Every structure is written in structure tokens, then in C-alpha cells.
Image (cartoon, rainbow, N blue to C red):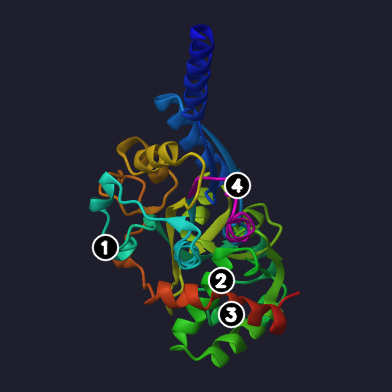
């Protein structure tokens, strides 16, 4: 009997030890950044991160499909409006980490359902070689993107799968002061100049960097990184107003590794992780993040006013409208 009890005790300890050594995560961060973060976390804590990289829209689809049996415990990265949507649909759970006090209130959920990591404004990329070859100049406004000379030259992401592309739609709605008819009229005219809609928001910039497309719409930090790596691109910000993402983080409701997920959540808000994130030329929200790689400051960019709650509540309707009226 004693041997049996001892065996059961050892088995329980083994199970507990095993369960504390990994955490399943979804991430919308670029793969090299995600790998750098999660590898360093494992190195420091011994907890392995089993991660899957998905577009923001794909994460929402998975959370819906897995709501009764979650396959991940934390979602790192992704456009903030989707984290708001996840909260509204009951996919995530609140958590107020110790470091959350350092993040400005407008960049986090008041109830602790999500927290912002960095801000990424929308911007344009122009491949210098292709521009010279085609005799075009870089666009400097959303209005410029409708020029006839750009027909078939612009690449952007697909709103069905990409938070970046949905941000373009909401940017237009805000620029046109919530007049959806005018905003979608703009999107239809833009469609004439779009050569391809990609699944991921970062893909258009990468395609532009190698000359596959002369022009691209993407987030500023992704484009800066490509430029710093030697890509022959010119980056311009829209003078008529730039929408932006708040890359955020949430804990998934019913996740099977809640303690490990909280440890990862806390760690990502700490000094080491913030230093790694800042290396991607983002505009960090944590005062703990180094500012040496911040190329642009928020106050230097013409950011539009965004209502994340409204954008989350209306995302499915607006994406469906885009799909019916414009989608390919």
C-alpha cells in the first residue's frame, strides 16, 4: 500500500512538473521576432513556448472554433481591435500584470483583458528601382494612391485575414467622418490599382522590397526594418492621416497553462523582452523599452482618431461588406 501511494505521489509530481514546463501560444508577431522572444523566455525560465504564427484574422477564427476546448493559453501580438473583439466574444480572460501600471490607460483595456505592446502607424513603401523604371514618384497621401498611373502597382493585405488591411478600411471611414459610402467608394477606386491582396499584413512590404510590386501598404515598423536591412525602398507617411495598430496581448479563456501564460505575459512586459521588441523599430508603449531604435515619434505623425470598441463591434459587418462589394 505504501509503495502504491508513493508511486501515485511521484506520478502526480511528475505530471505537475511536466505541466509547468511549457505554454501553448498564438502569435501575430513576425516569426523572427516571435522566435527571439520565446527562445529568450525559455532560456531564462525553462518554460518552452509552443507557438503558432497566424494572421490576426486567423487567430480570431481559431479562438471561435476552439472556444470550448482552447488549444492555446496566450495570444501575443495582433491588432488591438481584434483583442477588443475577442474580449466582447468571451474568448479571453482579464489579468492585470504588475508592469501594466506603466502603460498609458488609452493603450490597455480598463478591465485588464488586453494590453498594448507598441503602436504601428500605416505607411507606404515604394521600390526605388521599380519607380525609376516605371517613371513614378512615391505616394504621400491616400488620395495619391488613386492616381491612374498607379494602376495595378499597389499591393496590400486582404481584410478577410489581415488586421492591417482592416485598419485601412477603418482609416478611410475615419477620414471620411464615418461616412461608410464614401469610404467604400474610395476602397473600390483603390482596388483598381491593387495588383494583389495578401493573407498577411507584412507580405506586401516584403514583396515591394524585392521588387515584386512597385508600391505597398503596410505598418511603418515593418517597412523601416526592411529598409534598414538594405531593401531599396522609400517610406512615406500619408499626410491626410494615418491609421495605426496597437499591437496587443491577451490571455485566452480556459487555456490549459494559465500559470505559465501569466509568467510569459509578465515577462513580455519586462526589460529584456521590451528591449527585443524595440529592436524591430516599433513605437513602444512601455517606458521600460529602449528608445534608441525609435525612428519616428507619435507626436510627429498625423494619426487619425480611432474608436477601438466601435471598430471591434463592426469588424465582421465591414469585412463582409468589403468581401461582397470588392473582394476577389
Residue 105 shows which numbered tag?
1
Q: Residue at x 42, y 72 (%)?
A: 308
Judge by depth and name the residue closer to the eye, 224 or 171.
171
Label pair 3/4, CB-CB below 8 angstroms: no
Q: CA distance from mark 4 to mark 2?
A: 19 Å
Q: Could you say which quadrant of the image residue 55 lies in?
A: bottom right
Residue 141 showing in the rendered view: no
Q: Residue at x 71, y 58 (%)?
A: 212
Considering only vertical position in the picture, is 285 above or below 36?
A: below
In this figure, which residue is indicated by the disc labeled 2?
A: 166
Q: CA distance from mark 2 to mark 1?
A: 24 Å
* In this rendering, position of residue 191 left or right of residue 274: right
In this figure, which residue is indicated by the disc labeled 4?
A: 53
* In this rendering, position of residue 158 left or right of residue 8: right
Q: Is disc 2 placed on a helix, strand or loop?
A: helix
Q: Is residue 4 magenta?
A: no
- Highlighted magenta segment, given as a residue range: 59-75
Residue 90 showing in the rendered view: yes
- Residue 27, percent from left and from top: 54, 48
In this figure, which residue is indicated by the disc labeled 3?
A: 318
Amino acid at each position: 500500500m505504501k509503495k502504491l501511494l508513493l508511486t501515485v505521489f511521484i506520478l502526480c509530481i511528475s505530471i505537475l512538473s511536466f505541466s509547468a514546463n511549457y505554454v501553448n501560444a498564438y502569435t501575430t508577431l513576425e516569426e523572427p521576432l516571435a522566435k527571439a522572444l520565446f527562445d529568450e523566455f525559455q532560456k531564462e525560465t525553462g518554460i518552452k513556448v509552443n507557438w503558432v504564427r497566424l494572421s490576426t484574422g486567423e487567430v480570431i477564427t481559431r479562438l471561435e472554433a476552439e472556444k470550448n476546448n482552447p488549444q492555446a493559453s496566450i495570444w501575443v501580438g495582433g491588432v488591438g481591435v481584434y483583442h477588443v473583439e475577442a474580449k466582447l466574444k468571451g474568448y479571453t480572460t482579464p489579468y492585470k500584470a504588475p508592469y501594466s501600471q506603466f502603460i498609458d490607460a488609452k493603450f490597455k483595456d480598463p478591465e485588464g483583458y488586453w494590453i498594448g505592446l507598441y503602436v504601428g502607424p500605416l505607411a507606404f513603401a515604394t521600390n526605388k528601382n521599380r519607380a525609376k523604371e516605371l517613371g513614378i514618384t512615391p505616394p504621400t497621401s491616400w488620395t495619391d494612391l488613386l492616381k491612374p498611373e498607379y494602376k495595378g502597382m499597389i499591393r496590400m493585405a486582404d481584410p478577410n485575414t489581415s488586421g492591417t488591411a482592416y485598419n485601412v478600411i477603418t482609416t478611410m471611414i475615419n477620414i471620411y467622418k464615418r461616412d461608410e459610402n464614401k469610404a467604400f467608394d474610395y476602397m473600390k477606386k483603390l482596388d483598381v490599382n491593387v495588383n494583389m491582396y495578401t493573407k498577411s499584413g507584412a507580405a506586401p512590404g516584403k514583396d515591394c522590397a524585392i521588387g515584386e510590386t512597385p508600391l505597398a501598404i503596410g505598418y511603418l515598423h515593418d517597412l523601416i526594418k526592411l529598409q534598414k536591412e538594405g531593401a531599396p525602398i522609400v517610406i512615406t507617411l500619408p499626410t491626410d492621416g494615418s491609421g495605426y495598430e496597437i499591437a496587443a496581448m491577451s490571455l485566452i479563456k480556459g487555456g490549459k497553462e494559465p500559470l505559465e501564460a501569466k509568467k510569459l505575459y509578465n515577462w513580455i512586459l519586462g526589460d529584456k523582452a521590451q528591449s527585443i521588441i524595440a529592436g524591430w523599430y516599433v513605437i513602444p508603449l512601455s517606458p521600460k523599452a529602449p528608445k534608441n531604435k525609435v525612428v519616428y515619434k507619435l507626436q510627429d505623425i498625423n494619426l487619425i482618431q480611432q474608436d477601438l470598441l466601435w471598430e471591434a463591434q463592426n469588424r465582421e459587418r465591414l469585412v463582409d461588406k468589403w468581401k461582397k462589394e470588392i473582394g476577389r
